[in-house]
Amino acid sequence: MLSKILTSRRYWSTVAFIGLGFVVVISVIEHLRQYGGVSWSSFLEDYIHNGKWVRYILSRLIGGLLYGMIMGYYFELRKQRSKR
């Protein structure tokens, strides 16, 4: 069942959609909590100008991919079990 789900095109589109949503929501929440509102100049100073942008982007991509894979697998497994 695992290999059937992992090779499904629908699974990977679900992973991409959920992962992207996760990255956006977590990034907005983190930004609001860290800066107390919208502060683009502070964000650019902290992440872009100090050279932390690679770590920032990689952490978002890896986190989004992992969350999307876990949740996508859960949803696909639930769909297959409900069909039986």
Image (cartoon, rainbow, N blue to C red):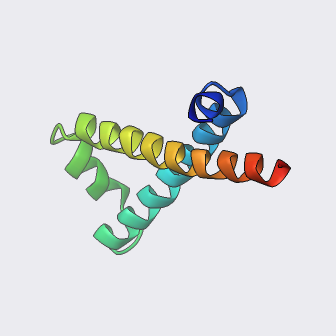
| Residue 75 vs residue 64, the one in the foreground | 75
The residue furthest left is 50
32 above or below 28?
below
Q: What is the residue that sits farthest to the right in this orientation? A: 83
Q: In which quarter of the image is the N terminus?
A: top right
Q: Is 30 left, or right, of 48 in this rendering? A: right
What residue appears at the point 60 percent right and 46 percent down from the top-left corner? 72
- Give residue 10's quadrant in the image: top right
Residue under the image location 21 percent in, 51 percent down? 46
Question: In the displayed structure, does residue 82 sit left or right of residue 38?
Answer: right
x then y, percent, for residue 58: 32, 36
Residue at 59% from the left image edge and 30% from the top image edge? 6
How many numbered marks, from 0 up? 0
Residue at the image position 70 percent from the left and 26 percent from the top: 9
Q: Position of residue 26 (x, y in %)?
A: 44, 59
Q: In this view, does 6 lie to the left or right of 84?
A: left
Q: Position of residue 4 (x, y in %)?
A: 65, 29
Residue 74 place in picture, x, y as percent:
60, 52
Q: In this view, does 32 lie to the left or right of 19?
A: left
Depth order, front residue of 17/33? 17
Q: Is residue 61 depicted above or below 23 in this figure? A: above
Place residue 16 in its image quadrant: top right
Q: Is residue 50 above or below residue 5?
A: below
Q: Is residue 62 above or below residue 23?
A: above
Residue closer to the observer: 35 or 77: 77
